Amino acid sequence: MWTALYVVSIVVVNWMFMAIAPWSTPLGDLYLANIMVGFVFVLRDYAQREIGHSVLFATAVAGVITWFMVDPAIALASITAFVLSELADWAIYSFTKRPLSQRILWSSLFAIPLDTFAFQYLANYLTPAGFTTEVASKAIGVLIVWYLLRARDRKLALTA
């Protein structure tokens, strides 16, 4: 279930960049997708928990679907950004033997800015407003999940 939601979320967010007009701000254009993309990073971590290292194949599937649904420039930027951030996220998430909440937090702290910069730069959407908002939206989503998982872990430790 998480993996399917992850794949769909990638395609939907990429479509949003093209289908929904941006808001003009003093710091540059801001897209609704800049705000919504934070959920993709959380879903990726749950998908990786569900299917392990095969999450990289799920990312590839999303990239292929995106290629056929949006402008090829957006698809190429998305695929490149996801490959870079997935590799960073995957390495940190996979090779640290920390609790899930910490792996999600640390992997996202590295992957979020990398993904955001790569996508926005390659797709010609890079503005201070877009970059800041997108990084913040991703970070807020990750921090909420981290907090909830950490609270769950603490509750389990107290009952054990």
Image: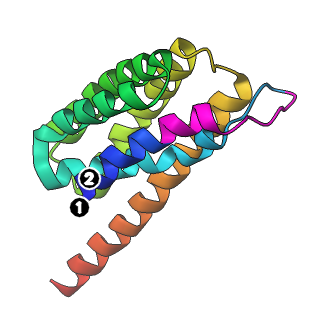
Q: In the rendered view, does 67 fall on the left or right side of 34?
A: left
Q: Secondary structure at mark 2?
A: helix
Q: In the rendered view, does 75 fall on the left or right side of 116?
A: left
Q: Position of residue 34 (x, y in %)?
A: 60, 38
| Up-down relation of residue 111 to residue 101 (above or below) | above
Identify the disc placed on residue 98: none
Q: Position of residue 29 (x, y in %)?
A: 76, 28
Label 2 and label 1: CA atoms lie apart by 5 Å
| Up-down relation of residue 31 to residue 52 (above or below) | above
- Position of the C terminus by quadrant: bottom left
Membership of 19 in magenta stretch? yes
Question: What residue span does the magenta drawing correspond to?
Answer: 13-26
- From the image, tell me which residue sits under label 2: 4
Q: Are marks 2 and 1 in contact (CB under 8 Å)?
A: yes
Identify the disc placed on residue 1: 1
Could one spot residue 118 in this view of the protein?
yes
- Position of the N terminus by quadrant: bottom left
Could one spot residue 104 in this view of the protein?
no
- The amino acid pointed to by label 1 is Met
Residue under the image location 50 percent in, 41 percent down: 13
Q: Residue furthest right?
A: 26
Snapshot colouring? rainbow
Residue under the image location 79 percent in, 37 percent down: 23
Quadrant of res 114: top left
- 95, 83: nearer the viewer: 83
- The amino acid pointed to by label 2 is Ala
Membership of 153 in magenta stretch? no
Q: Residue furthest bottom?
A: 159
Q: Position of residue 108 (x, y in %)?
A: 39, 40
